[in-house]
Image (cartoon, rainbow, N blue to C red):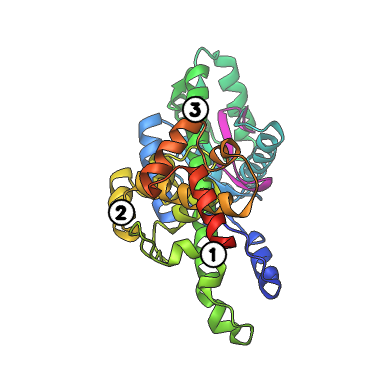
Amino acid sequence: MMAVFECPARRREIEGMSRFEYTIENVLDIPLWEKMQDRLAELTGTAIVCIDIKGKPVTKHSGRTAFCSIVRENPVSRKRCFRCDALAGVEAVRRGRPYIYLCHCGIVDVAVPVMVGDIYLGAVMFGQVRLRHKDREKAERLVNEISSILPQEDAAQQEILRKYELLPEMDYDRIVQVAEYINDMVHYIVDRAVKSHTRDETYKWLMSANAEQPSEEIQIQELLPQEEHRPQQTGVLPVNPSSVVYPAVVYIRDHLQQEITMMEMADLCHLSPSYFSRTFNKETGESFVNYISSRRIQLAKELLLETGKSISQIAEEVGYDNISHFTAVFKRTEGITPSAYRSSKKRKKFS
């Protein structure tokens, strides 16, 4: 979760970040996706292409069959392909899952929707296969339909039939498996793209605060909790907002009451766990586990002095479900128990 900053002069800019216009092109890294797409087509034995909301391709076709190449060479049938793909993508959105269907040529295609929230950006289309055990009559009827918009010579008819028979066959269950795999992959890529954009925009917002509005005397340090940019006795170092581990620092600050794992934080920062651990230690001056512990104790100290909450309530609020464990950690860090700490500070205040 990103922090919400209550700076009125900047609120519209923060809101504008959420209105970023996502497109299928800027969510999928097209050059990189096309390499993955080629490999997927090879591994699954299907043809794959990405389309926009109008059904028009935004990537090259990977593994396109000779049969579909003939169909798409004809302007009339090509428009039918675009319309068919567009309608299938919308149907996938309506159903909330990949949509398996017969295209206008009667062969199997699948639409996997690409969405950011409830915004439909396009779809990953795969297929160009025949279901196994289909009878010959279906093929004949299909060929007759297509030949009505293609050359009518017997030779052309035979060529179309030959290319249709070369289409790969696939079991329905296998098609479902491939659809689920590609759907999971698309969800993962979209999630990473959105998180990356949000993080980048937050960094830009923070780093431009002083430069753009000096009259408001906005300081980045003022937007962050003091513990994060001022060294403590525990050896905590300042963490620059441009650091790759900064999203983890913000998340930890806002979720101390929850269980926080290194795997989750490494994923949040788009890093491997080992690299995240080394970088986090270098940037903060503490190990991941010690950093969380010191943040929890620091918050507990504030709650002990500023609220009348019980020790058990404070323990739960800073992420300890066992008051004995909380007391032991607090005493090991501060040298006294939470109750003694509260009492001693209050005596000093009124002495």
Q: Is residue 173 above or below residue 204?
A: above
- Label 1, label 2: how far apart the Cα atoms are: 23 Å
Determine the secondary structure under disc 3.
strand
Q: Residue 291, how many percent across, how many down?
A: 38, 50
Q: Residue 62, how many percent across, how many down?
A: 42, 43
Residue type highlighted by circle 2: Asn
Residue type highlighted by circle 1: Thr
Where is the C terminus found, in terms of image quarters? Answer: bottom right
Residue 3 visible, this orientation: yes
Residue at image coords 56%, 77%: 209
Residue at image coords 55%, 13%: 135
* Towards the viewer: 8 or 48: 8
Residue 129 is tagged as 3
Q: Nearer the viewer, mark 2 or mark 3?
A: 2
Mark 1 vs mark 2: which is more N-terminal? Answer: 1
* Towards the viewer: 333 or 241: 333
Q: Is residue 250 above or below residue 155?
A: below
How busy is the neighbourhood of tag 3: few (under 14 within 10 Å), some, or many (20 plus)? many
Residue at image coords 53%, 35%: 183
Residue type highlighted by circle 3: Val
Q: Residue 67, how many percent across, how many down?
A: 48, 35
The residue that mark 1 highlights is: 202
Q: Residue 275, how many percent across, how many down?
A: 29, 50
How would you classify the magenta stretch by its main secondary structure? strand
Question: Can you name the residue that lies furthest to the front here?
Answer: 351
Q: Which residues are magenta?
A: 101-124
Is residue 112 rendered magenta in the image? yes
The residue that mark 2 highlights is: 281
- Label 2, label 3: how far apart the Cα atoms are: 52 Å
Residue 158 visible, this orientation: no
- Label 3, label 1: how far apart the Cα atoms are: 45 Å
